[in-house]
Image: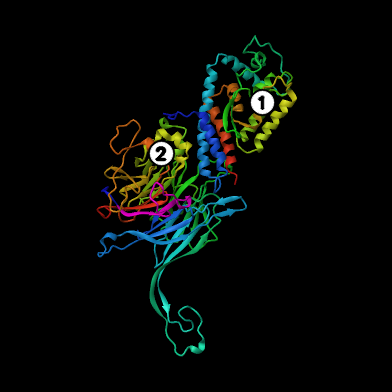
Amino acid sequence: GAMECAVDAQSLISMSLMKIHSSRTQRGGIKLHKNLLVSYVLRNARQLYIKEKYAEIYRMQQYEEVMAVCSGIQELDPLEPLEPQGAEDAEPEQPYYRSCCMEDQFSQNCNKTTVLDLDTHVVTTVENGFLHQDCCCAAAPQCAPGAAARKRKVDSAACSPDAEEPSDYTAGRKRLKREECSGADCSPDASNISNLISIFGSGFSGLLSRQADLEQVCSKQALASLGAWTRAIVAF
Amino acid sequence: MLSPIQVLCSDITTLSLEPEPFASYTEADIISTVEFNHTGELLATGDKGGRVVIFQREPESKSEPFSQGEYNVYSTFQSHEPEFDYLKSLEIEEKINKIRWLPQQNAAHFLLSTNDKTIKLWKVSERDKRPEGYNLKDEEGRIKDVSTVTSLQVPVLKPMDLMVEVSPRRVFANAHTYHINSISVNSDYETYMSADDLRINLWHLDITDRSFNIVDIKPANMEDLTEVITAAEFHPLHCNLFVYSSSKGTLRLCDMREAALCDKHSKLFEEPEDPSARSFFSEIISSVSDVKFSHSGRYLLTRDYLTAKVWDLNMESKPLETYQVHDYLRSKLCSLYENDCIFDKFECAWNGSDSVIMTGAYNNFFRMFDRNTKRDVTLEASRESSKPRAVLKPRRVCAAGGKRRKDDISVDSLDFTKKILHTAWHPNENIIAIAATNNLYIFQDKLNSEMH
């Protein structure tokens, strides 16, 4: 069968990233062949992971609401201020409605991200990702779509252990934090995110908004990031 | 054909004489390549420490019936040293990736040995005579006082103890950006090729400062990289044809007469993937680790992680035969990925008549498949089972949960650190050389029959 191992996609992702990371210090230089094969496992595991996450969302009670909200998010102009809305009367037709942030500051509906911490080598699913953080800050001039768009751009080139590209992302995020945070509003986890590599953030919201064919989106995302990996691999 | 295999020589340990399990060896002693020469008289091994050891077969003698055709050490030399590329801050390993013999054309023997970046041509010659009776110097080589010379003599050649001299004749360097995985001597005996992950170069044996690039699969944008070259070999008879295998499990046959750059293949051998067998590791286990032409030049033998396949050069759509080497590992791919064993590159070999194929596995097991009778056997290369003259006992691995016979090994007790990656078959006789980590085993068919 397709999944003959008991190992889940998340640990395969973590294992693969560590193999790529440790190959840099191996004697004899980076082995192109091995790293290419590892990147295929990484891609396969990610495809499954995205599928599983999507299925999870699908089963959620507030699925339709989330769909409406997130499709609304994608339509927002990043520079436009948010229109205040009431949390209770969620109407899918309203494109600017944000139920997740209004009803519960730490709602965990639409912003799960899978990350690998290179310091602790722990793979976690981050519940309070930046997407939500931007949502809940009242005077946020940069809304989630802007961040998502920026993040999407950064992510397409930055799924690598290299320091350079994540720093664009973390610089962007730190900027968001400074400008919008009133301290108490922000998730306490946000500060820890600065050394993590986010793999699924933009891909995830992209999925929800487009309602596109899952396989197609997955593979596009996967291939875009696969390229980033091979670029990271070929340092010579 | 698969008559009982007998131990021809005791195992030849390169470092330690201590009995196992206390035997220890350094990583440098791990054998990384094994190759018979064209007559089978010589057998060369290369190791991770950059050394080459050549064994020579003793001629069978009636007076000593017990030393029939045994292999003994003939010569040892350091082929490659570790290097450091200062420009890229990279260490270049001295490990010998491949050795290939040149066909013998005079009294001397020549072989090519390569590490990741540099190929060297070595001359191996014997000296068993030396001149004596010089006029101007004495026996120790000291210059004589001319006034003491009263008569002239002609120096004569006197026999001396056999000395084997090895000297580097050519160094082919700086032609490969990526790691060299194969070398292959052309049947024209003038050229050879070297292949790395993305390129194949053609060399003339006499010219070291120039090589021709004949295959280049490097994409313009490295982010588009999807496959690498894993092995390459010239056709044994047609000097214009060669084959190379890829990490995607494909084989490409190229004709050098068609174009200077053989990026377009003449034939593409590929088996469609079975969608029901798809897993996280499908790409890894389909990567071809070795490709060998049959002696006839009519077939190709390939090895991927779980199988060995025989292809007919006239049929590109699928292999002629597929042999399961250790299919019981299919359910263990996750753990094998974790401990990196899934990246092991097993080689494969034909016997002289192309009727039997051989390849290695784990637990110091190796497998032989008879293409005609469809019988196969699993044998073990270990000290316990390899007393000289002993007959190797066939082994069996029982899948987890399967019916277990006495002496069967269960999959879970296989030792994955004992892997047989390199094997070689004598070109004419049923003699095989098996490299098991730092040990070399040489086995022979008990009946010592000629190929059939």
The answer for which chain carries disc 2 is B
Residue for badge 1: A190
| Camera-nearest label, 2 or 1 | 1
Instruction: Residue type at mark 1: give it.
Output: Ala
Label 1: element kind: helix
Image spot of residue A12 (x, y percent): 51, 32
Q: CA distance from mark 2 to mark 1?
A: 49 Å
Image spot of residue B46 (x, y percent): 44, 55
In front: B116, or B303? B116
The answer for which chain carries disc 1 is A
Q: How many marks?
A: 2
In front: B179, or A156? B179
Residue B314 shows in this picture: no
Tell me which corner region of the image, top left, top right, bottom left or bottom right, holds residue A189.
top right
Q: Is residue B13 left or right of residue B172?
A: left
**Numbered badge on residue A99:** none
Instruction: Residue type at mark 2: give it.
Output: Glu
Q: Is residue B62 left or right of residue B132?
A: left
What crowding class fits label 1: few (fewer than 14 Cα within 10 Å), some (14-19), or many (20 or more)? some
Residue for badge 2: B271
Numbered range of the magenta stretch: B7-34
The residue sitting at 73% across, 23% down in the picture is: A180
In front: B418, or A225? B418
Label 2: element kind: loop
Is residue B15 covered in magenta? yes
Tell me which corner region of the image, top left, top right, bottom left or bottom right, holds residue B307.
top left
The residue sitting at 26% across, 52% down in the picture is: B446
